[in-house]
């Protein structure tokens, strides 16, 4: 069985590393991009089962990237994993097209959420 591929778009190097390791230990193939432009280049040439986006990318394009993905792909699950925790941030992320908005630094729900979303997408 082929590992599910997850694209992690995160501008913080330590968080990118943590995501790759955590997902790898959970039998996912994690690919990381430091910004929206790098993510878009990867999406042009590769297929992913799920996207994890930092809602607060330094280039301020986390939610914009979410909208871009949704405009061309209504099916692939998107998780926003962001330190922006106000209700308005969460609402904006969901309105941009994310399936789920999780707040950093608590990563305890990340893998269970990914599993749930991928199971639902496979139905």
Image (cartoon, rainbow, N blue to C red):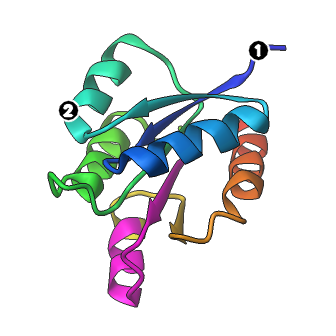
Q: Is mark 2 on a helix, strand or loop?
A: helix
The x and y percentages for residue 2 are: 76, 14
Using residue 81 as the reference point, say whether residue 35 is left or right of it: left
Query: Disc 2 designates what residue?
Result: 37
The x and y percentages for residue 117 are: 69, 49
Q: Which residue is drawn at 36% across and 11% down?
A: 45
Going by the picture, which residue comes out furthest to the right?
1
The x and y percentages for residue 21 are: 64, 38
Q: What element carries label 1?
A: loop
The x and y percentages for residue 15 are: 47, 51
Q: Residue at x 34, y 78 (%)?
A: 89
Q: Which of 11 and 91 is in front in this view?
A: 11
Q: Does any portion of residue 77 appear in the rendered image?
A: no
Q: What stretch is highlighted in magenta?
A: 78-93
The answer to whether 87 is drawn above or below residue 77 in the figure is below
State the quadrant of the C terminus: top right
Q: How crowded is mark 2: few (under 14 residues within 10 Å), some or many (20 or more)?
A: some
Indicate the quadrant where residue 46 lies. Answer: top left
Q: Which mark is residue 2?
A: 1
């Amino acid at each position: 069985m082929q590992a599910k591929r997850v694209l992690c778009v995160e501008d913080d190097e330590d968080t990118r590393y943590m995501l790759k390791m955590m997902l790898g230990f959970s039998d996912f193939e994690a690919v990381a991009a430091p910004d929206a432009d790098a993510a878009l280049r990867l999406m042009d040439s590769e297929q992913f089962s799920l996207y994890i986006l930092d809602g607060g990318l330094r280039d301020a394009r986390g939610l914009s990237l979410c909208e871009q993905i949704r405009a061309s792909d209504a099916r692939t699950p998107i998780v926003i994993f962001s330190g922006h925790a106000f209700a308005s941030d969460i609402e904006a992320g969901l309105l941009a097209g994310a399936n789920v908005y999780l707040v950093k630094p608590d990563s305890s729900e990340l893998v269970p959420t990914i599993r749930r979303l991928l199971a639902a997408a496979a139905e």
